[in-house]
Each structure stands twice: as structure tokens, then as C-alpha cells.
Image (tube, rainbow, N blue to C red):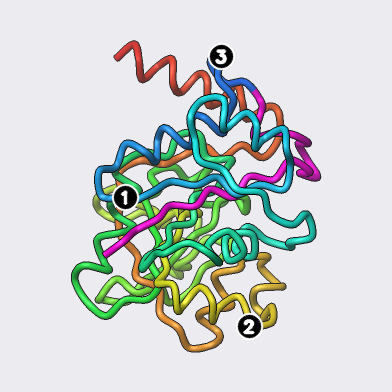
Amino acid sequence: MKIVAVIPARYKSTRFKGKPLAPIMGKPMIRHVYEGVAGSSRLSDVIVATEDERIYNACREFGAKAVMTKDTHQSGTDRIIEAISEIDADIILNIQGDEPLVNEEIVDALISPFTAGNISYSSVMTPIYSSTEFFDPNNVKVVVDKDGFALYFSRCPIPYDRENPGNPKDEKGVYGFKHLGFYGYTRNFIETFGKLPPSFLEKKEMLEQLRAIENGFRIKMEKVSISTIPVDVPEDILRVENFITKSYNR
């Protein structure tokens, strides 16, 4: 089974132009992402897909494989579909280019469902131990069925605890599960998914994965211990650097 990780990296971000090249601890963010993914021995290849020559050239300078794609794509998924058009792969991983704390645990968790059964779509989640994080709409929450398949994703706090809505943690101190924006797909699935129009719930929540659920596809969720810090705005760089510094000093 050939498994390829693709990192979509867009220069023209609305809130943070050029963020894949933003320096973190002296290295461009895209290099942190690439090196975090490349640590997995289960991957056949790691590819950066970008619309900008500056990102392409930076990746080549530190030894990463990169491909140029159109600058008209509306999502990272669409960029990935173009990037893999001439690549031989059975499983494709979608690793966002603004996730500098991605690591081997996440990569391996995305891959593991495909080795255990008839799975076409995977993703990851992590326990939420903070009420602030649970009620923050910037953190996407997910609920799953007894077999670990996603039932729903929302920016609202789910599940809703009717008996204790203000402090809905369980006996282990877990409020719920945070969805981390990493995905695994079979080649057939991602190509099918890319042809589906944006769905009603997807547009309401601004969550692309809801398109799959609305169309009857199942997403296998795997638990991971890490909670990453995606970089959405320049202020997030300091949060990531503080996390890395504390990790080094443990």
C-alpha cells in the first residue's frame, strides 16, 4: 500500500498572507510541517502543493519535494486532488500547511484505520480538558458512535449536557473531543468527494468534512494525545514558539 502525504500550502491567505513562510524558531513554518510529517516511516512520500513560487523554492531549498498547482482552488482538498493527478498512491493524507506541531503520532493515527478494515476516510481527535477550549467556536468538536465513526462536527459545544450545561465534563475531566484538521483518504474517495457540491451543513458550520456525512460517507476517527496549534493569524506564531520552548525545557 503506497501512502503519500500532501501538504497544501497557500501563500494568499486572507488573514495572514504568506504564512507558510513565516519564521518559527528560525525556520519557515512549512519546514516544521514537512519535518513533522516526514518523521513517519509508514509514508512512501511527502509532497508540498502550492500555488506560489516563493513557497515552492523555499521547499526545494530545504530538500522537500514540491509541486506547483493552480491559484484558483477554493480549498486545500481541491489543491491536493490536482497534486496527485499524476502520482501513484493508494492512500492520501491531507496535512494542512499551517499546522507546525504535526507529528508522527498524528500521521500514524490517520493511516491505521486503512490497515484494519474497509475505510475510505479517516481523521483524528483529542480529548478536551478545558471548558474555555470546549466553548470556543474556533475549536471544532466531534461526537462519534460506538465504533468510532463521526456522527457530527460542530463549532458549538457537543454533546450538550442537559443536566450540567455549564460544566459538562465527565468523571475523567473530559468535556468532549476536539477535531484536528488532518485527514486520510483512499484515492477513489478523495476524487469522488472533490466532485460533490458544498453541502447545507458544510456552509452553515464552514466545515468541509460535513459534506461527506451529509452524502452518506463515514469518517473513522482516531484518538491522539496531542492538541496542535494551527496558525491562523500572526499572533499564533508566538503561541507555537512558546509551546516548542516549553517542550524542549521539560
Q: Earlier in the sequence, mark 2 or mark 3?
A: 3
Q: Residue 183 bears which disc, if any?
A: none
Label 1: how many residues lie within 10 Å, few (<14), some (14-19) or many (20+)?
many
Label 2: how many residues lie within 10 Å, few (<14), some (14-19) or many (20+)?
few
SS class, disc 1: loop
Residue pictured at 30% horizontal, 59% vertical? 111
Mark in the foreground, 1 or 2: 1
What is the CA distance from the residue labelled 3 to the residue labelled 1? 26 Å
Which quadrant does the C terminus fall into?
top left
In the foreground, 2 or 72: 2
Expressed as whole percent of the image width and height from the top left, the position of residue 38 reads 37, 38
Left or right for 9, reference 4? right
Task: State which region is magenta.
Answer: 1-22
Magenta stretch containing residue 172, yes or no?
Answer: no
Amino acid carrying mark 3 in the image: Gly
Q: Earlier in the sequence, mark 3 or mark 1?
A: 3
The image shows residue 118, relative to residue 143, as above or below, that is below
Expressed as whole percent of the image width and height from the top left, the position of residue 176 reads 40, 57
Q: Earlier in the sequence, mark 1 or mark 2?
A: 1
SS class, disc 3: loop
Which quadrant does the N terminus fall into?
bottom left
Identify the residue position indicated by label 1 in the image.
43
Label 3: how many residues lie within 10 Å, few (<14), some (14-19) or many (20+)?
few
